[in-house]
Image (cartoon, rainbow, N blue to C red):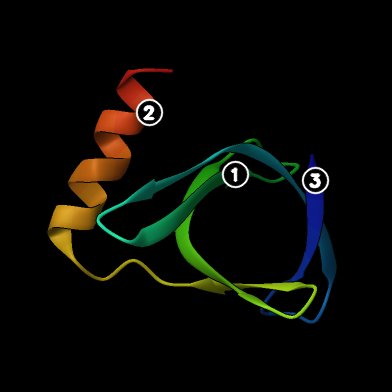
């Protein structure tokens, strides 16, 4: 599965979903772009659109790290 985002320069960037998971009522998405960097965000649905939200809590980053270790 993939999706498009608009970067800071206003360019469309294709991203590939590595995985999605839920933990403690939070929805997480792990994905990569064409540079093969790996990113993680919280997300929420807004109608048919996915809204990416920054992960700001260190505990949430620890959850993402554990998820990636188990892939």
Residue 70 on image: x %, y %: 34, 18
Give the quarter of the figure containing the N terminus: top right
Q: In which quarter of the view is residue 69 placed?
A: top left
Comes first in the chain, label 3 or label 2: 3
Lateral position of residue 62 relative to residue 42, left or right: left
| Tag 1 near tag 2, CB within 8 Å | no
Q: Is residue 39 above or below residue 41?
A: above
Q: Secondary structure at mark 2?
A: helix
Distance between mark 3 and mark 1 Cα atoms: 9 Å
Binning the other alpha carbons within 10 Å of mark 3 as few (below 14), some (14 to 19) or many (20 upward) gives: few
Binning the other alpha carbons within 10 Å of mark 2 as few (below 14), some (14 to 19) or many (20 upward) gives: few
Residue 12 on image: x %, y %: 85, 68
Distance between mark 1 and mark 2 Cα atoms: 11 Å
Instruction: Identify the disc placed on residue 68.
Output: 2
Q: Nearer the viewer, residue 37 or 20?
A: 20
Q: Which residue is mark 1?
A: 31
**Residue at position x 32%, y 42% from top?**
64
**Residue at position x 35%, y 62% from top?**
26
Residue 38 on image: x %, y %: 52, 41
**Residue at position x 84%, y 73% from top?**
11
Residue 39 on image: x %, y %: 50, 49
Lateral position of residue 1 relative to residue 33, left or right: right
Q: In which quarter of the view is residue 49 placed?
A: bottom right
Q: Secondary structure at mark 1?
A: strand
Q: Secondary structure at mark 3?
A: strand
Distance between mark 3 and mark 2 Cα atoms: 18 Å
**Residue at position x 56%, y 41% from top?**
37
Give the quarter of the figure containing the C terminus: top left
| Tag 3 near tag 2, CB within 8 Å | no
Q: Which residue is mark 3?
A: 2
């Amino acid at each position: 599965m993939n999706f498009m985002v608009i970067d800071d320069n206003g360019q469309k960037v294709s991203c590939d979903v590595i995985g999605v998971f839920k933990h403690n009522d939070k929805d997480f998405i792990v994905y990569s772009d064409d540079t093969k960097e790996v990113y993680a965000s919280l997300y929420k649905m807004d109608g048919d659109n996915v809204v990416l939200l920054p992960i700001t809590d260190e505990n949430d980053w620890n959850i993402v790290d554990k998820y990636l270790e188990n892939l």
